[in-house]
Amino acid sequence: MPEGDTIYRAARALDAALAGRTVSRFESVFPHLTRVDVDAPLRGRVVERVTSRGKHLLMSFSGDLVLRTHMRMNGTWHIYRPGERWRRPRHEMRIVIGTDAFEAVAFTVPVAEFIAALALERELAAVGPDPLAADFDPSNAVARLRARGEMAVADALLDQSAIAGIGNIYKSEILFAGGVNPFVRVADLPDAALERLVAVAVRLMRANVGEGTSAAIVTYTGFRRTTGGTDPSARLWVYGRAGKPCRRCGTLVSRAKQGIHARSTYWCEKCQTRNFRDPGVRTGSDRGQSRL
């Protein structure tokens, strides 16, 4: 499933291609979208902006209308010049937004709806603060995590109503970089540990979107990195590295299924302690208890 940084970059690219341009073509396989187009045509509207909120991509049109899409596992947006050959088969097309200079095509997007712009905030009220947003409030994110006291901290990070945009890769990487065991309850974590996790989430996610430019349409910036290194074979700390040595201490990285959706969690039993009497100290004394 695309995570928040992927959706952010997609929105930025779509905004660079479409913002300020008039819609000349609209097509969709979704009847609920085409019905709206019949009643209030997209053609002739101006694409005002394209933004993201966590894993939601929001395309705003003149006349108080927003197209919200969610990629789920396999959805993606492409940008083409008019008449350019698509890189995906037509039967995977779900939405086409065409202008004089570019057309945006959504492939295998399972969730799409038109929302009145004035109702957008109400529709997204349950979505938590986005670490990639300019107005991100760390204290709000910490408070929302704290409210999930009985949840394992890894599951709490995946809760989009706590913090928006964190997926399975970032979950494991944030917990490793923050030195927190994924199976400990939120209620058992001190405030300093939660604050550290939120700060790490902001740092890692923002490092993977960059600044971009107002002129370029950037659709790909390379593979996601959390280690800060330039070696392409050492991009991530623990995710996908079960049975391989921890990049910090050499302990073999562990993997287990976690949560109601049995998502894979990766962690280092030595670097990510359960002992939070002093959140600044990491010990391996409880290493044998870490695996569930």
Image (cartoon, rainbow, N blue to C red):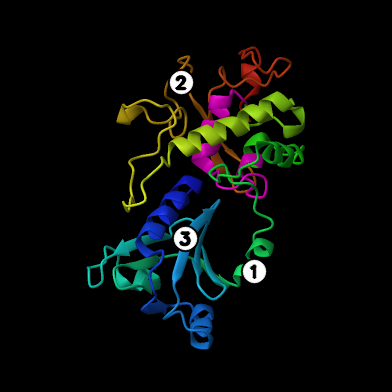
Q: From the viewer's perspective, is residue 116 above or below residue 224?
A: below
User: Which callout, 2 or 3, points to the residue nearer the camera?
Assistant: 3
Residue type at tag 3: Val
User: Which callout, 1 or 2, points to the residue nearer the camera?
Assistant: 1
Residue type at tag 2: Cys
Q: CA gap, disc 1 to disc 3?
A: 16 Å
Residue 173 at x, y percent in the picture: 51, 32
Q: Is residue 30 left or right of residue 151?
A: left
Q: Residue furthest bottom?
A: 39
Q: From the viewer's perspective, is residue 202 above or below residue 104?
A: above
What span is in magenta? 156-180
State the residue at coordinates (54%, 76%).
Answer: 63
Which numbered tag is attached to residue 246? 2
Residue type at tag 1: Leu
Label 2: few (<14), some (14–19) or many (≥20) C-alpha neighbours in 10 Å:
many
Q: Is residue 139 left or right of residue 93?
A: right
State the residue at coordinates (47%, 55%).
Answer: 73
Q: Tell me if I can see residue 265 in this picture.
A: no
Q: Nearer the viewer, residue 76 or 48?
A: 48
Element type where label 3 sits in the image: strand
State the residue at coordinates (37%, 45%).
Answer: 212
Query: Of the residues under marks 1 and 2, which one precedes in the sequence?
Result: 1
Label 3: few (<14), some (14–19) or many (≥20) C-alpha neighbours in 10 Å:
many
Query: Of the residues under marks 1 and 3, which one precedes in the sequence?
Result: 3
Decide whether residue 175 is among the magenta residues.
yes
Q: Which residue is mark 1?
A: 118
Which numbered tag is attached to residue 50? 3
Assess whether mark 3 and mark 1 are in contact (beta carbons under 8 angstroms). Answer: no
Residue 223 at x, y percent in the picture: 35, 39
Which numbered tag is attached to residue 69? none
Assess whether mark 3 and mark 2 are in contact (beta carbons under 8 angstroms). Answer: no
